Amino acid sequence: DAGVIQSPRHEVTEMGQEVTLRCKPISGHDYLFWYRQTMMRGLELLIYFNNNVPIDDSGMPEDRFSAKMPNASFSTLKIQPSEPRDSAVYFCASSNRDANTGELFFGEGSRLTVL
Amino acid sequence: GNSVTQMEGPVTLSEEAFLTINCTYTATGYPSLFWYVQYPGEGLQLLLKATKADDKGSNKGFEATYRKETTSFHLEKGSVQVSDSAVYFCAPSPTFGTGTRLTIIP
């Protein structure tokens, strides 16, 4: 199995630009999670989906952030407009069981730098 | 929702020392508990898990026991190696602790 695939691995952009991060979960997994990791705040859950439907988006920082899952094999996390404080590593994870019991399989992350 | 309090790092130990990383949680119901490990430049990967009270998860010499009475899931290893240097995360999934950076020196 290919595992969770994220792209891009690295993104450098300027403040105010739109950023789109992409994730392909493991085939057959019907839970998908987006996390943000920073030194100051650790690993924060932003949003998660079940069967392509957003279940909990309470961790999304503000309206500049949006996430979609148009089908079972693809999700995006968009930041518009981006700000320097958005610089972080963003991880996508998938699971074939519910959030309380299932092992999460993580991608390698997308490192975002906003100048 | 679930939350977790994890021992703050960084932790530096000599090779072959005994390791304990403390983790306590609050949770709705009785979720499974997990320890994940993150090596530099990589995503998290599962180290071990326990699915119910008094269960012990173990892997690669690491152990943790699901203690409902003390709401704890402390990670232990009897003799650490340099290759154990990484960041360790406790989780009543999908919430994670802040992570504990462990460095083992030869």
Image: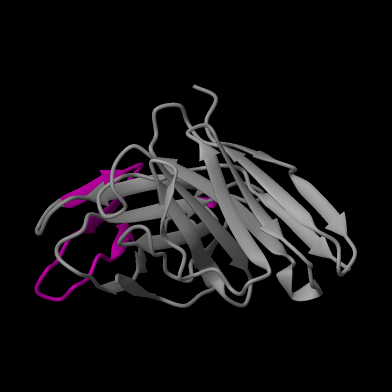
In the rendered structure, the answer to whether residue B40 lies left or right of residue B96 reads right
| Residue A113 visible at all | yes
Q: How is the image coloured?
A: one colour
Q: Where is residue B24 in the image (x, y as percent from the top left)?
A: 28, 74
Residue B2's quadrant in the figure? bottom left
Q: In the depicted view, which residue is nearer to us: A99 or B43?
A: A99
Q: In the depicted view, which residue is nearer to us: B6 or A34?
A: A34
In the rendered structure, the answer to whether residue B47 lies left or right of residue A109 reads left
B62 above or below B31?
A: above
Q: Position of residue A14 (x, y in %)?
A: 90, 64
Q: Does the magenta stretch include residue B79?
A: yes
A99 above or below B17?
A: above
| Residue B79 visible at all | no
The span picked out in magenta is B56-82
Q: In the depicted view, which residue is nearer to us: A78 or A88?
A: A78
Q: Where is residue B37 in the image (x, y as percent from the top left)?
A: 47, 52
- In the image, what residue occupies the spot 42% across and 48% down? A53
B9 above or below A73?
A: below
Q: Is residue A95 magenta?
A: no
